[in-house]
C-alpha cells in the first residue's frame, strides 16, 4: 500500500535550534537610528511586526541600487532612518553567502534541519528557514544558492532564507582571519583583495583587519580563492554612536554576549519588556533597543525576550475564521494575526496577506505556545504535501504534544496495520506503555486516509 500524498507534521523544537521573529521595540527611540532584523512582509518593510515606510528610501542590494521587490521574506536587512516615525531613509541588504553549493548533509528533511557548505562557508538551516523556489530535498552539490542569515560566533551562518539561484557576482560575509597584505580568510575561503575597487566608499584590501566582519563581493572560480572586487564593513555606524533596534538569536563568545555579530552590553539598568534576565541563554531570540557605538558594541537599554517553544505543523487548512483569528489544520486550532510572516509557494508570490488565507489550502506553519495559547509565527502556502505527523516530545508541557496527550493519540491509532519501536515491530497497543519524553513519533496514512504505520524512535537510540 502506498504511503501518503500530503503531510501533517507536528514537531516540538527548542529555541536554540530555530530562528523566529519577535516584536521589535519602536517606542521612545526617536530620530535617526538603525534597525537590523529579518523581513517579514512587504508593502513597506515589516520587521518584528513594525512597518517602515520605504517610499522615499534608497535601497541597496549587495552594494548596488535595487528595489523593494528585489527583497524577499526572511532577508536580513539594515534600515537607517527615523525609527520612531517608522520612516526609512536607507535599506541595505547583503547576502550572507551566494555561490556554489559544495556539500549537503540533511539531518531531518521534515524539520528542514541540515548543514551545508557554500563556497567555504558552513550554513545551518532549521524550521525557521524560508526556502524560496526549492525544497531542502531538492538541493544538490554544484547548484548556486543565495543565503541570508546571521553569523554565529563559530563563523557558521544560521540561514533565515535560502534560494536556489545564481548571482552575477558571488558574495561572502563573515569574520576576517589571517589577514596579510591584501589577502585574508573567511571560513575556509581565501580572499584575494588585490583588485578591490574602493571608489564606492568601501574598504581597501589593506584596510581589512582580523576580527572585522565584512561583506565581500567578487567572483569565485572553484580554485579555493575568492577574487574580491568590493569590501564593505558589516553594520558600520561611522564615527559616532547611534540609537539602534537589533533582533536575532543570542550567542556567547568567550563569556561575552553577542547579537548579530556585535558585542552586547547588558547592565543593571537594562529593562525587560518581556522575559527576564534569567531567560537569557544562547539561541534565545531577542529584540534589543539601545545605542550602537562606533566600537561595534550594542549597549542595551530595553530588551524583549522571546518565550515559548516553537513547533512545525503542516497539512490541509480545514477552516478559517477571520473574525476570531483562528485557523484549523487537521483538527488543530491555532491563532493568527496580521503580524504573521507569510509566503505563497503555490503560485510564485513572495508573500500574501492574512485575508488571502482560505480553506483547503495546503500550508506549512511554524507555531509557538505562549501562556497556553498556540499562535502562528510563520505560514507558507504549499503546492503539495505528504500526510505524516511527526512529533518529538520535549518537556511534556506543550498543549498537544505532551506525553499524556500523545498516549491518548496513540490509543486512537490502534487501527494501524504496523507499529515499531527502534525498528522492532510491536503491537500498537504496546506503544503507549513505552513512549517517554524525548522520543520521536511518526504516523503515516495510506491513500484512503487510514492509519498505516506508527514508528517510535526512543531517546536512547541514535537517529
Image (spheres, helix red, strand yellow):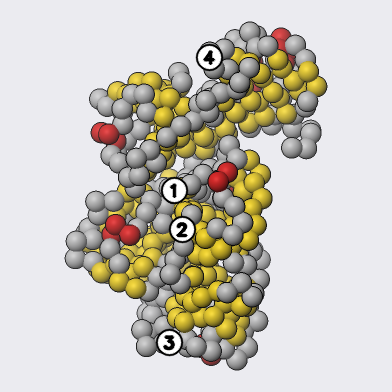
Report, in whole angstroms, how far the alpha carbon at label 3 lies from the one at label 2. 26 Å
Seen from the viewer's position, the closer of residues 1 and 225 is: 1
Looking at the image, residue 89 sits to the left or right of residue 385; the answer is left
Disc sitting over residue 449 in the figure: 4
Mark 1 = which residue? 133
- Label 2 – label 4 distance at C-alpha: 37 Å
Q: Which residue is mark 2?
A: 165
CA–CA distance between discs 4 and 3?
A: 61 Å
- Residue 412 lies left or right of residue 240; in this view the side is right
Q: Image point 64% across, 25% down: which residue?
A: 442
Distance from disc 4 to disc 1, alpha carbons, whole Å, reads 29 Å
Q: Earlier in the sequence, mark 4 or mark 1?
A: 1
Instruction: Name which of mark 1 and mark 3 comes first in the sequence.
Output: 1
Is 100 located above or below residue 25 in the figure?
below
Pointer 1 and pointer 2: residues touching (CB < 8 Å)?
yes
Instruction: Name which residue lies at 57% across and 74% down.
Output: 221
- Residue 299: percent from the left, percent from the top? 45, 66
Between residues 239 and 358, which one lies in front from this camera angle?
Answer: 358
Q: Residues within 10 Å of mark 2 (few under 14, many from 20)?
A: some
Which structural element holds mark 3? loop
Amino acid at each position: 500500500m502506498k504511503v501518503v500524498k500530503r503531510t501533517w507534521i507536528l514537531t516540538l523544537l527548542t529555541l536554540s535550534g530555530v530562528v523566529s521573529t519577535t516584536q521589535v521595540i519602536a517606542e521612545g527611540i526617536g530620530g535617526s537610528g538603525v534597525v537590523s532584523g529579518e523581513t517579514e512582509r512587504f508593502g513597506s518593510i515589516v520587521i518584528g511586526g513594525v512597518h517602515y515606510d520605504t517610499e522615499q528610501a534608497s535601497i541597496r542590494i549587495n552594494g548596488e541600487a535595487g528595489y523593494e521587490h528585489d527583497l524577499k521574506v526572511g532577508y536580513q536587512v539594515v534600515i537607517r532612518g527615523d525609527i520612531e516615525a517608522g520612516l526609512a531613509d536607507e535599506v541595505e541588504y547583503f547576502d550572507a553567502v551566494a555561490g556554489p553549493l559544495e556539500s549537503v548533509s540533511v539531518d531531518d528533511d521534515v524539520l528542514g534541519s541540515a548543514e551545508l557548505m557554500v563556497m567555504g562557508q558552513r550554513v545551518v538551516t532549521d524550521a525557521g528557514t524560508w526556502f524560496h523556489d526549492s525544497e531542502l530535498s531538492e538541493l544538490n552539490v554544484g547548484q548556486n544558492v543565495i543565503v541570508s542569515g546571521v553569523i554565529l560566533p563559530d563563523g557558521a551562518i544560521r540561514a533565515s532564507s535560502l534560494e536556489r539561484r545564481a548571482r552575477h557576482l558571488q558574495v561572502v560575509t563573515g569574520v576576517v582571519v589571517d589577514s596579510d597584505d591584501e589577502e585574508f580568510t573567511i571560513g575556509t575561503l581565501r580572499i584575494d583583495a588585490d583588485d578591490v575597487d574602493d571608489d564606492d566608499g568601501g574598504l581597501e584590501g589593506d584596510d581589512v583587519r582580523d576580527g572585522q566582519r565584512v561583506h565581500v563581493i567578487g567572483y569565485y572560480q572553484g580554485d579555493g580563492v575568492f577574487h574580491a572586487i568590493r569590501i564593505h564593513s558589516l553594520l558600520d555606524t561611522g564615527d559616532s554612536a547611534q540609537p539602534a533596534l537589533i533582533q536575532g538569536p543570542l550567542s556567547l563568545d568567550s563569556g561575552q554576549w553577542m547579537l548579530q555579530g556585535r558585542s552586547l552590553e547588558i547592565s543593571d539598568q537594562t529593562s525587560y519588556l518581556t522575559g527576564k534576565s534569567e531567560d537569557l541563554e544562547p539561541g534565545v531570540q531577542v529584540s534589543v533597543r539601545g545605542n550602537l557605538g562606533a566600537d561595534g558594541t550594542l549597549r542595551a537599554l530595553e530588551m524583549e525576550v522571546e518565550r515559548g517553544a516553537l513547533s512545525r505543523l503542516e497539512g490541509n487548512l480545514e477552516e478559517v475564521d477571520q473574525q476570531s483569528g483562528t485557523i484549523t489544520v487537521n483538527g488543530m486550532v491555532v491563532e493568527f494575526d496580521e503580524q504573521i510572516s507569510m509566503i505563497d509557494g503555490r503560485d510564485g508570490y513572495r508573500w500574501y496577506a492574512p485575508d488571502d488565507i482560505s480553506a483547503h489550502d495546503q500550508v506549512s506553519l511554524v507555531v509557538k505556545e505562549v501562556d497556553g495559547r498556540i499562535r502562528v509565527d510563520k505560514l507558507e502556502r504549499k503546492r503539495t504535501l505528504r500526510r505524516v505527523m511527526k512529533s518529538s516530545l520535549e518537556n511534556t508541557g506543550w498543549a498537544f504534544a505532551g506525553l499524556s496527550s500523545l498516549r491518548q493519540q496513540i490509543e486512537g491509532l490502534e487501527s494501524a496495520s504496523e507499529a515499531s519501536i527502534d525498528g522492532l515491530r510491536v503491537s500498537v497497543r504496546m506503544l503507549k506503555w513505552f513512549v517517554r519524553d524525548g522520543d520521536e513519533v511518526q504516523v503515516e496514512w495510506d491513500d484512503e486516509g487510514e492509519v498505516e504505520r506508527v514508528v517510535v524512535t526512543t531517546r536512547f537510540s541514535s537517529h
